[in-house]
Amino acid sequence: MKIFSFTEDHSYILKLALPAIAGLSTQMIVSLVDTAMVGRLDSAEYNLAAMGIGVFATWAVVSLFSSLATGTHVLIARRYGEKNYNGCGEVLNTSLILSLIIGIAVSLIVVFFSYDIADFFAVDTTVGNLAGEYLYYRFMGIPFFLMTVSYRGFFFGIGKTKIFMISGVLVNFLNIFFNYIFIYGAFGYEGMGLAGAGLGSTLATVCDTFFYLFVSALPSYKHKFHYLKNFRFVKEIASKIIKISLPVSLQNIFILVGFLSFIAITGFIGTKEQAASNVIFSALLISLMPCFGFGIAIQTLVGNSIGSGDIKMAKYYGYETSKIATAYTMIVGLIFFAFPRLVLILTTNDHSVIETAVPALRIAGIGQIFYSIGVVLANGLQAAGKTLFVMIAEVVANWFVFVPIAYLLGVVFGFGLIGAWAALPFYVILYGGVILLKFRYGNWESYRKV
């Protein structure tokens, strides 16, 4: 295998990472735009607090199953590294069938219980009702979202991250268009407020599914991977996808429940503080989404390298990618610390919410610097098949460090929102350190078989 020079190595990493970052950044823009639109409704603090619960609850439900992308990504990256192209097509077909079955079943259940889910996490009754309306419409898009997840895993695994970037731009445009119509009212439709944001996002997701169906039907893909010619469900592949994905699913749901618990804690401090926390989380996407993009790149690079039998290169790519990601988060952290109001005004024009969020955003800006190491190298370990270890590491750091410290400092000791957000650096430093040690000293020879 050709050994790249330093400059070529980083160029190759960025070639994969930048389109993924662009695609994920469009998701960040969607979140920022949604928050900005909702933040300009009447009773902004109630709508923002409700949206915070709605967004995290949606992520909690979707993330329980969206990790099918990880299982699909890892298996396809390995097979692509082995040059087993028919095998890549078999993985995609099996993943799509799994996604469709699971998506329909889950959507039917959570749509029915959408208001109950919102009420469970809301302290204020008004916030709970608004969040329930949002979730009712947002949960309808789950089957379509999970199908796009399978396609993402496929295109990530073969290194075609630009497809995801194009998809992200399309969804971003459509989300803004639909949200404007249904939140405020246009073209004869009456404005639905926060509920319109849920409906608009669902319609954009449906359109995204059709985009992936169109791209996958192009001759350059269907003739090489033969997934349309040999469309079938392979039980053995499904078992492998689930084996890899299940720990990631549990990790996602536990972590998002942890963050929902954090949002609930800030609700005990005050509704304005809860709204401020939602704004801060939206701002943090400026940093976290690109880190997840580097994670996508490293999953492909580690998977391809292990598939071709080059363990040394797999580890090397992990270290180099984490260095680039950390440099980025350092720049973002500096911006958050020096210009917090300029960042926060992107999501709301409510002066009191902005001023409440400023000191907490500065703390979050420092903490997120260290999260890049954990995110990137964790994705490398997932590509190597160590999804269970990654799950345990983050759940322990989140549930037994982040949430308890946030409650103690924010509520029990009375330090308010600043105290609650002061728990973040403890969480990310512990998690990043544990992942780095495992990546460096783990038994990589045992990672060859997945």
Image (cartoon, grey):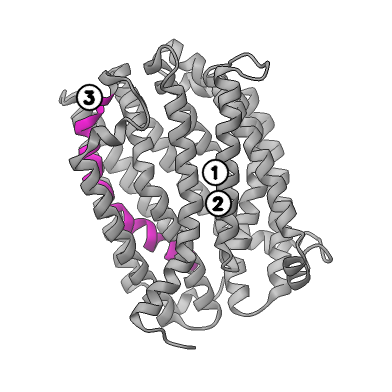
Give the residues in magenta: 354-383
C-alpha separation, residue under disc 3 versus residue under disc 1: 35 Å
The part of the image, by quadrant, that contains residue 419 is: top left
What type is the residue that disc 2 sits on?
A: Ser
Residue at (66% x, 30% y) in the render: 109
Q: Which mark is residue 64?
A: 1
Look at the picture and state if 214 lies above or below 132: below
Q: Secondary structure at mark 1?
A: helix
Residue 301 in percent (x, y) is at: 48, 71
Q: Amino acid type of disc 3?
A: Glu
Q: Residue 240: within the magenta?
A: no
CA–CA distance in space, label 1 to label 2: 7 Å
Q: What residue is at 54 percent from the left and 82 percent from the top? A: 308
Mark earlier in primary sequence (3, 2): 2
Marks 1,2: beta carbons within 8 A: yes
Q: Residue 294 at x, y = what percent?
A: 42, 60
Question: In this image, 309 relative to 217: left or right?
Answer: left
Q: Residues within 10 Å of mark 2 (few under 14, many from 20)?
A: many
Place of residue 210 in the rendered image (x, y in percent of width and height, measured from the top left): 72, 46
The residue to which callout 3 is attached is 355
Q: Nearer the viewer, residue 395 or 56?
A: 56
Amino acid under disc 1: Leu
Element under disc 2: loop
The residue at the point 72 percent across, 59 percent down is 216
> What percent of the width, then of the height, locates residue 64?
54, 43
Quadrant of the snapshot with the C terminus: bottom right
Mark 1 surroundings within 10 Å by alpha-carbon count, few (fewer than 14), some (14 through 19), many (20 or more): many
Disc 2 marks which residue? 67
